[in-house]
Image: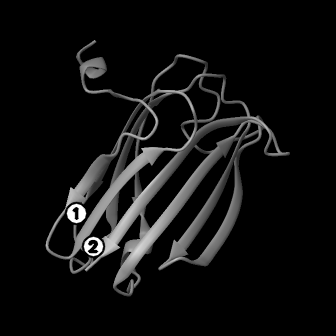
Amino acid sequence: MFGLLFFILFTPGVSEFLCMSPDLEMSYTFCDSTAHAFMFNLTPCSMMDKSVWKAALTWIPRSDVTFLKVVFNVWYNGARALHWKERLCSGIDDEYSVCGKLKGETVATNFDIKGARMKFPKGNYDIILQGFSDDSENNMVICLNFTMIVK
C-alpha cells in the first residue's frame, strides 16, 4: 500500500529529473499522449564512477504484458548513434519479470545498465525508448524520452 505513494503520476510533457551531478544530468518525459503510473531511478549519478549503473523501475502497465518489444533509439548531438530492437516477452519461456504481468499489476524490478562502463563523449544525448505489445510496432504501451547531458 505504501509503495503506491511513491508512484509518480505524470502527464505528457512534464519532465522528471533522474539525477544531476557535476558531470551528468539525466531527465525523462513521456512521449505518448496518456499519463502513466511509473517511476525510474538511476544510481550512481556520475560518468566518473566506473561502477555499473543500478536502475530501479516501478510501473503499472495499462494492458497485459504477454508480448513486449522495445525499440531503443539514441541521438548524440542531433545525429543518430544507435537503433536497437529487442523482443523481451513473447509469451513462451520469458526471462524478464515484466513478462506475464496483467493490466494494473505492479511491475517492480531492479537491473544493471552495463553501458555505464563505456566512455561517453561530452555532449547531449536524446534517447527514445518505446515499448510495443505487438511485433508490428502498432500498439505502443509506453514511450519515454530520456535526455542525458554529459558535461
Left or right position of 69 against 129? right
Residue 123 percent location from the top left of the image: 37, 81
For the C terminus, the image quarter is: bottom left
Q: Position of residue 133 (x, y in %)?
A: 73, 36
The residue singled out by tag 1 in the image is: 44
Q: Which mark is residue 51?
A: 2
Q: Quadrant of the rendered structure where residue 63 is?
A: top right
How packed mark 2 is, by other alpha carbons closer than 10 Å (few <14, some 14-19, many 20 or more), is: some
Quadrant into which the N terminus falls: top left
Task: Tell me the mark number nearer the camera, choosing from 1 and 2.
Answer: 1
Q: Do the residues bearing badges 1 and 2 touch, measured as CB atoms within 8 Å?
A: yes
Asked if residue 45 is positioned above or below residue 47 in the image, the reply reads above
Three-letter residue code for mark 1: Pro
Occupied quadrant, residue 82: bottom right
Q: Is residue 85 above or below residue 135?
A: below
Element class at badge 2: loop
